[in-house]
Structures are given as C-alpha cells and as structure tokens.
Amino acid sequence: GKSLANKGKKTDTTIAALSAAGVDVAYTSADNPRAGLLRFNGASGIEYHAGFTNFFKIMTYNPSRLYAMAVFQLSQEIGRHR
C-alpha cells in the first residue's frame, strides 16, 4: 500500500492495477476507472482510500488531501440523510 500511494494530485493508476497489486478496493462496477491510492493517518492508524477524478478536482480548489477527504465524507453523510 505505502509504495503504491499517490504522491501527486492525480489519478495515476486504475482500479484493476490496484487489485492486481493486491489492494482490496471496495469498488463494485465493471468499469475500470482511473484512480489514485491515497494514504491517510486515521484515528485508528493508517488508512488507504482510492480517489477518483472528482476527488482530485476538489483539490484544485484547495490542494489539501485532508480538505478533499473532509468534503467527500461530508457529501457521504448528506447523502445518507436524504
């Protein structure tokens, strides 16, 4: 995971490539989108997340990965309460 983690701000791999490298990605569609593997220090330790195009577009407004993750998590919560 750590060596595959995205160092930049782009989708530099695909879901299929991550899966082939042994990364278990919770993605259920049959397509093979571009993605970047992101590494975060979470409350319970290291967390890895696959980021897609929209995640990295958020970072054009604010380049912080933590900001982009907070926006994503907020959108998930809003979606759950609709």
Image (cartoon, rainbow, N blue to C red):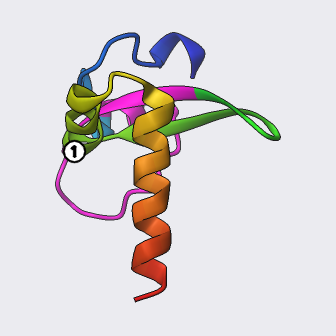
Figure check: 33 above or below 63: below
**For the view shown, which residue lies furthest in the bottom direction?**
82
Q: Nearer the viewer, residue 34 or 53?
A: 53
Q: Position of residue 19 (x, y in %)?
A: 41, 38
Q: Nearer the viewer, residue 23 or 5?
A: 5
* Residue 18: in magenta span: yes
Q: Position of residue 81 (x, y in %)?
A: 48, 86
Does 14 sit left or right of 3 as displayed? left
Residue lying at 45% horizontally and 35% vertically, measured from the top left: 67
Q: Quadrant of residue 58?
A: top left
Q: In which quadrant is the C terminus drawn?
A: bottom left
Does 45 sit left or right of 72 as displayed? right
Q: Nearer the viewer, residue 76 or 14?
A: 76
Q: In which quadrant is the N terminus drawn?
A: top right
Name the residue that disc number 1 marks. 54
Q: Quadrant of residue 41?
A: top right
Q: Position of residue 40 (x, y in %)?
A: 61, 28
Does 43 sit left or right of 37 as displayed? right
For the image shown, how many numbered marks are present on the structure? 1
| Other residues around mark 1 within 10 Å, as few (<14) / some (14–19) / many (≥20) | few
Residue lying at 35% horizontally and 64% vertically, measured from the top left: 28
Q: Amino acid at mark 1?
A: Asn
**Which residue range is magenta in the image?**
17-39
Residue lying at 24% horizontally and 20% vertically, measured from the top left: 12
Figure check: 63 above or below 35: above
